[in-house]
Image (cartoon, grey):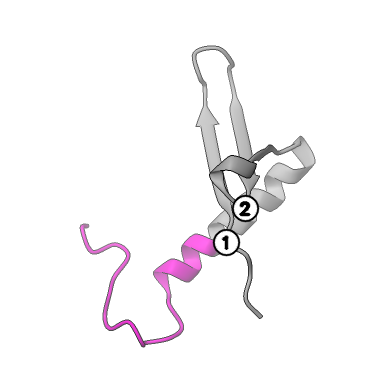
Amino acid sequence: MKTTPRTYVLTLNSSSKKGLRLWTGESIHALRHCSVKQIGLALREMQQTVDSLQNPTSSSGGSYSFNRGR
């Protein structure tokens, strides 16, 4: 099953508002502000996406490393 790509925007302590703000959507033009209840789920989704990028399950792309510059 293929999942739809998601876009996340996270802001921390902007000049006009203090605190964490998170928007998510299917594209940069369809972002919606996350409510307090949705932030935990969105952060878990982001972490799962980062984990899957760092540990690819298929080897069709060769030996590409996400952290190659470190």
Q: Is residue 11 above or below residue 24?
A: above
Tell me where residue 49 appears, x and y as whole percent: 53, 63
Which of 70/60 is in front? 60
Separation of residues labelled 1 and 2 (CA atoms):
6 Å
Residue at the disc numbered 2: 26
Tell me where residue 62 appears, x and y as whole percent: 28, 83
- The quadrant in which residue 37 appears is top right
Say which residue appears at 76% left-offset and 36% top-offset.
35
Which of 3/56 is in front? 3
- Name the amino acid, label 2: Glu
Residue reaching furthest top? 16
Can you tell which mark lies on residue 5? 1
Q: Is residue 60 above or below residue 17?
A: below
Q: Are marks 1 and 2 in contact (CB under 8 Å)?
A: yes
Near mark 2 (Cα within 10 A), the count class, few <14, some 14-19 or many ≥20, is few
Of the image marks 1 and 2, the number of the one nearer the N terminus: 1
Magenta stretch secondary structure, dominant: loop
- The quadrant in which residue 46 appears is bottom right
Range shown magenta:
49-70
Residue reaching furthest right? 37
Q: Is residue 22 above or below residue 68?
A: above
- Name the amino acid, label 1: Pro
Answer whether residue 59 is magenta in the image. yes
Q: Is residue 42 above or below residue 2?
A: above
| Relative horizontal placement of residue 44, taking residue 59 as reference (left or right) | right
